[in-house]
Amino acid sequence: AIVAAVFVVAATRADRRAVFAAVAVATLFAGFGPWLIVGVAGCGLFAASVRLRTRSTQLRVIAAALAVLGLFHLSDIGFFGSSALLAGASIAVVFASAYRSCGSRSRKQLRRTLGGALGLVIVVLGVGAVQALLARSAVNAGVDAARAAIDAAHIGDTDALSRELAQAQMTLEQANARVSSFTLKPLQLLPVAAQHLRSVATATEQGLLVADEALRTAEDGNIEQLTLRQGQFDLALLAEIAPGLERAAARLGTAVAKIEHDRSPWLLPPVDRRLHSLLDEVADVRAEADLAAKAARVMPRMLGSESERRYLMLFGSPGEAREFGGFVGGYAVLAVDDGRLDLIQAGGINDLVPIANLGKLDDPTSYPVEYVAADPVMFPQNLTSTPSISTIARAARDIFPELYGAPIDGVIYVDPYALAAMTELSGPVTVEGIGDQLIGDAIADFIFDGQYRLFDDRDERFEAIGELAEATAAAFATADLPGPEELGRLLGPAARSGRLQVVTYDDAENDFLTAVKLQRHFIAPPTIDSFALIQTNATASKLDLFVRREVRYTVDVEGDDLSAVVDVELSSEIPADAPPLTYGLTDGTNQVLLSLYSPHELIGLEVDGRAHDYVTQEEFGFFRYALFEVPLPANSTVTLRFELAGTAPPEPYRLGVWQQPLVNDDDVTIAFSSDEAAPLVAEQTLVEGWLFDSALEQSGS
């Protein structure tokens, strides 16, 4: 407003050419919009002031007012700040012209006024710099304390969490007081300095509000009690803390929006980088807070707040592969009532066979054809004969409408690697007939190797697996669990790789389980390319212990057309000292049932260079190309080639690779080429699902 008023006064004294230049700039660089109309009106009035002798001064004043408004709203041309340079140059020309038209006395007075104003600006900037340095120290201390509080929350150190939150609140309050102090108010009149002040003030204020809300939640909720202790979880406390978690998540969302809104493009690069980093951190914490709030909403029901919940835990062994991972060798039924975990029953899968034989699949036609053929009613060890956990859960509820006196409310799948991780939390377990207690990797070693050396009888092995299932479930049901960071470190890899999965029959609960990576969904993604290589065992042997797979996906995109080749190398690597019982009734030849899931049409299939028959089915949005009994002799290699043709997904090309949790992880190579980009090759050992993104690969990210 001050600059506009001085400009209008200067325009009455400046040379007409200088004023015309300013009016022209305001018109020519206004872009298309309402400010173009303002510029055109200014040009018209200025032209009229030149032609008319009467009232020319008044018209020039109005034209100058319209021109300066237009100059304040120019559009950038070519680079950020170009509008400010144009406007500043135009205004400076008018001021210079007006200055030259003044007498010596007026010029002297103007110089004094300008010098005084400049001195005042220097003083204001000096005071602001001192205050900014003091505020910066407090802000940094507050941010450090907030980070320490987040770290404490991850590891479950509730005392440190409350202490660090209190420190963050105190220091951010000091910083906010300095940033909003009266001595910094004059900075709001200075361009660029004002934008910095506003951005920092907003960030500090929002940080303080978040710290206040978080500290209130931590103190009011008594969160140090919010852990599983001796198999007991305080659901009343969780319900009590839920509103605070939701408020904290909402406050973080508001903070992100307001900080982003006041983040000016005029910020200096170092300041902008710090602010960008802060926004990223707040966004990450917000995601965790949203997840915590969601947990507080759904976990009480999952843990029996309304009525007892029962979960069927299936212990799978990929030594004899099934589509989901491994055949089911053991089970446990867990009950949770008002936060208290109890083991109802556990044992080998043979214990469930007579119960399963009394059940049925309610609507067999709604299940995949191959799943019905696996007959999980007659053979419940085949419950995992599908890559979809939701299908397994539906079948379990159909087959066991009631199990040991009550219906089941969810299914938990655990394989040996997940069991090993669980015992790191629960402590070692004991199986009769084994001298040592089992913990960690020793669990997997026993399931994959030790049981076949210790027990000759098949029933003894099933009994041992049942005892292991019972001991593990019982130990976990009475364990003290650490904070989410330690839980994530120990169980996260097993969950992300599909070795530990949980599913219920409630959509909100399943959304939460998906968010915490405890539930994977096998379904064809609609906007990216994808494939899954799934195998199962046809010999009732444990020869899958010794199978390794190397997979190469070669894809070429030309316009809307896609062609791909999937080369698979199956290798049998049986060590000389392998327990004979792992052979089953075979001579070491594994009969591998291999299926390729793809959204594309299969136009050719070869096994060891010869055409091979296959069956096409549709499952989960994919075409399933199923092979039958591909023989894999001991210590040999078989090669397969699938040739595919289809429609390319939207750019940039992305490919989702599904990971089947087997004993040995796949080695996967992706070779991508297109008519618009240089060829790319990427490879990795598939310990979990892989999203290949050609744009990130091309940028080296």
Image: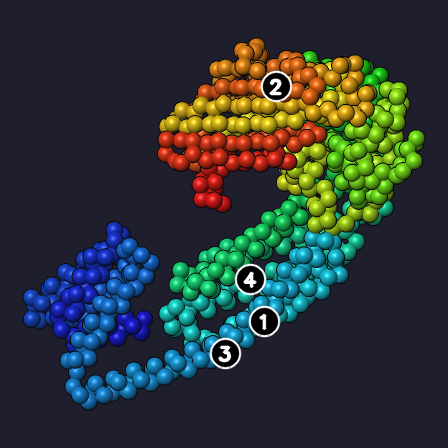
Q: Residue at x 48, y 15 (%)?
A: 603
| Mark 3 vs 4, N-terminal side | 3
Query: In whole angstroms, how far apart are the C-alphas of marks 2 and 4?
Result: 62 Å
| Residue 554 in the image: above or below residue 491 | above
Tell me whether the residue at label 1 lies in contact with that at label 2, contact meaning CB atoms closer than 8 angstroms. no
Q: Nearer the viewer, mark 1 or mark 4?
A: 1
Mark 1 vs mark 4, CA separation in Å: 15 Å
Label 3 neighbour load within 10 Å: few <14, some 14-19, many 20+: few
- The answer to whether marks 3 and 2 mark residues whose Cβ atoms lie closer than 8 Å is no
- Residue 206 is marked as 4
* Marks 3, 2: nearer the viewer: 2
Percent x, y of residue 452: 84, 25
Residue 511 in view here: yes
Question: Visible in this render: residue 65?
Answer: no
Q: Secondary structure at mark 1?
A: helix
Badge 4: residue crowd in 10 Å (few <14, some 14–19, many ≥20): many
Query: Number of callouts in the render?
Result: 4
At x 52%, y 57%, the residue is 277
Q: Quadrant of residue 7?
A: bottom left
| Above or below for 618 versus 67 | above
The residue that disc 3 covers is: 130
Rendered residue at 78%/36% (across/down): 419
| CA separation in Å, label 1 and label 2 | 66 Å
> In the rendered image, which residue does mark 2 sit on?
638
Residue 138: assigned label: 1
Residue 239 in the figure: left or right of residue 45: right
What kind of residue is marked 3?
Val
Give the label, 2 or 4, closer to the camera.
2
Mark 1 is surrounded, within 10 Å at the Cα level, by few (under 14), some (14 to 19) or many (20 or more) other residues, namely many
Q: CA distance from mark 3 to mark 4?
A: 22 Å
